[in-house]
Image (cartoon, coloured by chain):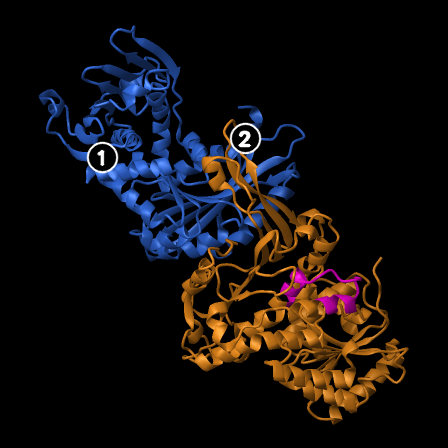
Amino acid sequence: MSQNLQPLTLGGPREANVAALAEELDALWQSAGDAEGREDVTRACALTLLIYTESERGAREVSNLVGALTLQNPCRALILVVQPNESPAGLSASISAVCQLPASGVKQVCCEHVTLVARGERVHDLDKVVVPLMVSGLPVCLWWRAGSPLQFDYFGKILRFIDRLCVDSEWYPNPESDLPSLAQTIQKTSSLAAITDMNWARVTPWRELAAACFDPDGMRFYLSQINQVRIEYRAGAADSPPCLAQGLLFAAWLAARLGWKAAGVGQSGLEEGEKRNGEGNRLLTFKGRQGDIRVQLVPGLAGPRCSSGFLTIEMKVAGDAPAKFTLICGPESKSVVTRIEIPGHPPQESTVHLQVFDEVALLNEELKLSSRDRVYEETLAMVASMTS
Amino acid sequence: MHQTPEPCAMVIFGASGDLTARKLVPALYNLARQHMLPAGFSVIGCSKTKFTHEQFRHKIRQAVREDLNLPDQDDPVLDSFTGNIHYISDNFGDAAAYSQLTEFLKQLDRDHGTSGNRLFYLATPPSFFPVIVNHLGAAGLARPKEPEKTWSRIVLEKPFGRDLKSARDLNRVVTGVFGEQNVYRIDHYLGKETVQNLLVFRLANGIFEPVWNRRYIDHVQITVAEELGVENRASYFEEAGLFRDMIQSHVLQVLSLVTMEAPARFEARSLRDEKAKVMRSFRPITLEEVDKYAVRAQYAAGFVSGKNVPAYRAEPNVNPASATETYAALKIFIDNWRWADVPFYIRSGKRLAKRVSEISIQFRRVPHLLFGGGATDAIQPNLLSLQIQPDEGISLKFSAKLPGTAMQIRPVKMQFQYGESFGGVSPSAYETLLHDCMMGDNSLFTRNDAVEISWEFVDPILERWKQDGAKGLAFYESGSWGPAEADAFIEGDKRRWQRL
């Protein structure tokens, strides 16, 4: 990144009157333009980004992220701190501008940033403040930065006005019930917003690498023969939740693309050692055209060697024509080793770069999309069918 | 260089009211500051309320300072301007009052050189229009003795009648006394820059007019939304309702400017002929078809501009069982070659999510989408938006490729705003329109035939709603974008209201 793309907050956030936020924003830009040396401030906006959080701390974290986010996605960012159980009930707001540090002779491009705090009963009035602040004619994205499910009682009206709802299933405390709930939400809102999942973007490089194993001549045959899959996902640690959701999404993606039917979930059938390994062990069974398929989900301790959600993914063909396709999180935290083992052939191994996105990069990726992600929706439906 | 009108005197009936203080006098003062008023220009305020000349001037000075946010310091222009403001307190329902007015005007001609030119402005409730007009006629103030040298014009504030019959009656009286060419039916919407610019935009640019038709345009939406409720106009509003207050007047006029054919010349008669012509092409809506083409609703309690607000029926001076609509949505078709089968969706309401007036012209999708997969889903139709208020401007939405190797498409917006592009402050609609009145240019004023055509179109809708009373009246939460019925109304055509 060049120096001129560093974010810079134009003055600290200032308290604003909720009743006249649009006017307050105009005044903010007026004062930015009038300030000495800031004659060339340009107010840029390509979308309205609503960010749902449930705490002031969350809002502060988001506030730091928004500056970086606006470098690629100039937007009007509305950070919504929603606290229905707090008192006293009320709505308060603050506004600020975030700018790119300009190169010499170049206009300074700035975005606006509104934080709205709704407490108690006032959460039900949030739509009356938020909807008028959406920039007309441009896409609106709601980033649900919380593990709780979408609150239809006070977000239902806002949903009517958004184009994209972006969740992060990594935040979900119980992915096996929360992901199916999300699938239901998608059905409920299908005529309204497209829903995407930042966790899906984390799984995407692994999906690409898994699919690439079957691209060479002669490999496609094995795809329909896969009957054992072992997914070792990163177990939870003090500073990070377990990546079970990513494991479920990968398994469901494979099942949905290969036309498998979910047959059951549980621990029966696992080796005794795997059962003892912890609660994260799952055995998923499917019916495929060629017979039964077993998919094991196993938590593993990643340590410092892999910052990805997966440690290893093995796809095996057992039987007359055995084969094994393995993806291993490499010794460097940003690489993956892919290995293809077929009897009678020397093992093929290669190491490829694995791009691990941070939260801002993930959201930037999501914001590039503006249509529904059918593959994700089918995957989620498969998760629901796997876990029901 | 500005054109300065001929010397004249302006008589405002209903001068003690809000309109005079909040709109007319600040507009006149701004004209004075820009040297756009003639030398000796004088104003006579007329009303029943008792004021001396000096008391009235004091009220006007305060109103101008407040409205224009002027500093409380010596302002020689304001002093000079208000020095030429006078006041007559009388009952203008009586003939005697007009003798006094006549004498006063003659005195102004002598003292200030107003040359016998008169501009009468009726800022009164419409029920007074015929009385005042007839008295002006009887007093000889409507037809100057030397019409080739001097003029008498009259300005009427809307509503111009409350149905076709009353509009025809009013037109008969006013045109009978003054002659249609001297009648200025004012609609402040038509004085706004964007509305005037509509014609420039359409007819001074080569690229828009060729696509301004059914072949390229999918549909048009016109939204006039207010955050305010009925405020202190409950008595008037209970009688009029939103449909008369906004749609019959402002919105249909704006629609006619969007849809009319290019006039032969940019002058009043040609413009007004074309407006009337397109209005005659509005497909009539019969009593039986009203539910298919229109939705009406009333605001319930809610939350607007950071505060709780009451339901319309709980507002002071409103009937607790009122069936008056505060929101209306309408679908209009124009049966002519240019617009056949293109729907025009109109919505207007009080206590909506935000104050905004906008014309949105949505173009048809491209005939063949060649970009694959998700990229195709992301392509949205082009949208041309003409913003009338609060920020006057024009924007065009189109699709652009996101930087990168993948074919990802996102809608972006090209924006022109008066305030930013031209700097300075646009004249208020009243400045433009009052100046036009004095100049004798009635291009932006509504002609009698257009008024009658619009009433002819809306009468069946109003009649049906009157018959139905509260039956079929929908409700919407204050601070929302209107009732669910209005969403269903447009979604039934597989379209959505623009997000404004």
Per the rendering, the mark at residue A85 is: none
Identify the chain of the residue marked 2, using the numbered disc in the image: B
Chain drawn orange in the picture: B
Q: In the image, B46: left or right of A109?
A: right
Please rate how many residues cluster around mark 2, counting C-alpha atoms within 10 Å: few if below 14, some from 14 to 19, many from 20.
Answer: few
Secondary structure under the numbered disc 2 in the rendered image: loop
Does residue A127 appear in this view?
yes
Residue closer to the observer: B494 or B194: B494
* Residue that numbered label 2 is attached to: B403
Quadrant in which the N terminus of chain B appears:
bottom right
Q: CA distance from mark 1 to mark 2?
A: 39 Å
Q: Verify whether residue B271 appears in magenta.
A: yes
Q: Amino acid at mark 1?
A: Lys
The percent coordinates of residue B397 (x first, y second) are 58, 46
Q: Residue at x 25, y 20 (%)?
A: A315
Does residue B225 appear in this view?
no
Q: Which residues lie in the magenta part?
A: B253-274
Which quadrant would residue B165 be assigned to in this image? Answer: bottom right
Per the rendering, the mark at residue A261 is: 1
Please tell me whether residue A133 is drawn above or below residue B280 in the rendered image.
above
Q: Nearer the viewer, mark 1 or mark 2?
A: 1
The percent coordinates of residue B164 (x first, y second) are 61, 81
Please tell me whether residue B78 is drawn above or below residue B465 in the rendered image.
above
Q: How many marks?
A: 2
The percent coordinates of residue A375 (x first, y second) are 36, 35
Which quadrant would residue A2 be assigned to in this image? Answer: top right
The percent coordinates of residue B442 (x first, y second) are 76, 70
Colour of chain A, in one word, is blue
Secondary structure under the numbered disc 1 in the rendered image: strand
Q: Amino acid at mark 2?
A: Pro
Please rate how many residues cluster around mark 1, counting C-alpha atoms within 10 Å: few if below 14, some from 14 to 19, many from 20.
Answer: some
Q: In the image, B169: left or right of A6?
A: right
